[in-house]
Each structure stands twice: as C-alpha cells, then as structure tokens.
Image (cartoon, rainbow, N blue to C red):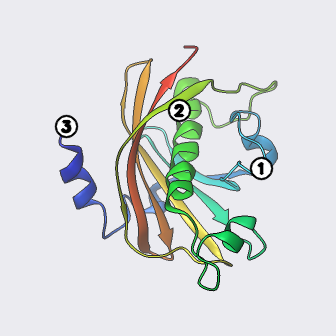
C-alpha cells in the first residue's frame, strides 16, 4: 500500500461522509471502558458514529481555551500541538479496533481496555491550525490489522476542513 499517496489523497476532503455511520452516543465514561488513557491524556470526548462494514468511526474533541497546552504552545498565538492531533486519531482508531473485535456497539459490562503500544507514525500532514475553543471532529478508518499490528488513517476536521491527516500504527501487546 502506498501510504504517501493515500495521505495525499485524503488531505483535502473528509475520509467519508458521517451520514453513512450508525449513530453512536458514547461519552467519556464509556470510552474509559475500552481505552487505557485518562485525563489529561484522554483526547476523545465522544464517539458519534461507526460503520462496522466500512470499518470507520467518528468522534468529537472539545478544545477548551483553558487547556494547559495552549499556554505554552506558541504563547500569544496558541495552536493545538500536531502530535496531540495524531494522538487523537490514534485513540479513535483504538475505539474502532474494539468495535471491530467485538462486532458490537454496546459498552462492555466490565472494562475491556486494549493493551497497545504505538510503533510508528507512518505519515502526517498538518494543514491548518487547530485553535483554542470550539470542537473538532475526528474520523478514522482501518487500513490493516493482522491481530498484532494495526494501521489506521484518520483526520482532524475543523468544520469540514481537514486540519490534520495521519496514518499511524500500533502493536497489540495482548491479542
């Protein structure tokens, strides 16, 4: 797979239409049942839709002006760090992995935290700044998953404009 070409193709318009997703209303408490991250590093606030057949997912992240990263990342002209945008996409991709493994949109009765390690950022484009205040939409789509390594392409959207497009890879520590 030509990842560079895939990223270039997906840097100008959303990966998919959110209208095709099955609606989902998972908030932070449900997300914590499947992700190992916690505040302040839990970077997905809500899961809004998923399509198991197309292996895609959407979510939201609110960017409070009081978030401490804005104080130190370009003081006077704050911008959300690109590395955290890639992390948002990765966390959303992990949520998608959970749904694809379980083939269900229901929260687990007991926590089912995925144990993973990031192995690489295959590539990323930072196309426009993500500013304090407001909310961004997160999109992710599975590229590959062999049960040990998984790759996802994702985007951070300001409205319908792509602010970040990235492909990342994780290794599942426990199958």
**Which quadrant of the figure has residue 74?**
bottom right
Q: Earlier in the sequence, mark 3 or mark 2?
A: 3
Residue 134 image offset from top left, x and y in percent: 66, 77
- Identify the residue at image location x=58%, y=44%: 91
Relative height, residue 46 to residue 75 (above, below): above
Mark 2 lies on residue: 97
In the displayed structure image, the side of residue 175 where residue 127 appears, left or right: left
Q: Secondary structure at mark 3?
A: loop
Binning the other alpha carbons within 10 Å of mark 2 as few (below 14), some (14 to 19) or many (20 upward) gives: many
> Gap in Å between the C-alphas at discs 1 and 2?
17 Å
Taking depth in this image into account, of 66 and 115 the one nearest to the observer is 66
Q: Residue at x 82, y 45 (%)?
A: 29
Residue at 54% x, 28% y: name it.
117
> What residue does disc 1 label?
28
Residue 57 drawn at (x, y percent): 51, 49
Please give left or right for residue 170 compared with residue 41 in the image: left
| First reached walking from the N terminus: tag 3 or tag 1 | 3
Q: Residue furthest top?
A: 175
Q: Which residue is label 3 attached to?
A: 1
- Of helix, strand and loop, which one carries label 1? helix
Which image quarter holds the N terminus? Answer: top left
Q: Residues within 10 Å of mark 1 (few under 14, many from 20)?
A: some
Q: Is residue 143 visible?
A: yes
Point out the tag, 1 or 2, that comes first from the N-terminus.
1
- Which mark's residue is nearer the viewer, 3 or 2? 3
Q: Secondary structure at mark 2?
A: helix
Query: Is residue 22 at all visible to an observer of this figure?
Result: no
Residue at horizontal 18 percent and vertical 52 percent from the top: 5
Query: For the residues marked 3 and 1, what is the alpha-carbon distance in whole angstroms?
Result: 34 Å
Answer yes or no: do the residues labelled 1 and 2 have beta carbons within 8 Å? no
């Amino acid at each position: 797979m030509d990842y560079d070409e895939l990223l270039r193709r997906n840097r100008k318009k959303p990966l998919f239409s959110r209208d095709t997703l099955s609606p989902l209303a998972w908030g932070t408490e449900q997300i914590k049942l499947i992700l190992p991250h916690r505040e302040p590093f839990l970077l997905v606030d809500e899961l809004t839709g998923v399509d198991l057949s197309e292996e895609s997912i959407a979510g939201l992240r609110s960017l409070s002006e009081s978030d401490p990263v804005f104080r130190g990342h370009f003081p006077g002209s704050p911008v959300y760090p690109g590395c955290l945008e890639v992390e948002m996409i990765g966390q959303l991709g992990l949520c998608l992995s959970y749904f694809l493994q379980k083939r269900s949109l229901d929260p687990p009765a007991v926590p089912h935290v995925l144990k993973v390690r990031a192995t690489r950022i295959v590539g990323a484009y930072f196309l426009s700044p993500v500013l304090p205040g407001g909310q961004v939409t997160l999109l992710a789509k599975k590229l590959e998953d062999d049960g040990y390594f998984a790759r996802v392409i994702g985007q951070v959207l300001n409205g319908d404009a792509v602010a970040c497009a990235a492909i990342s890879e994780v290794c599942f520590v426990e199958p």
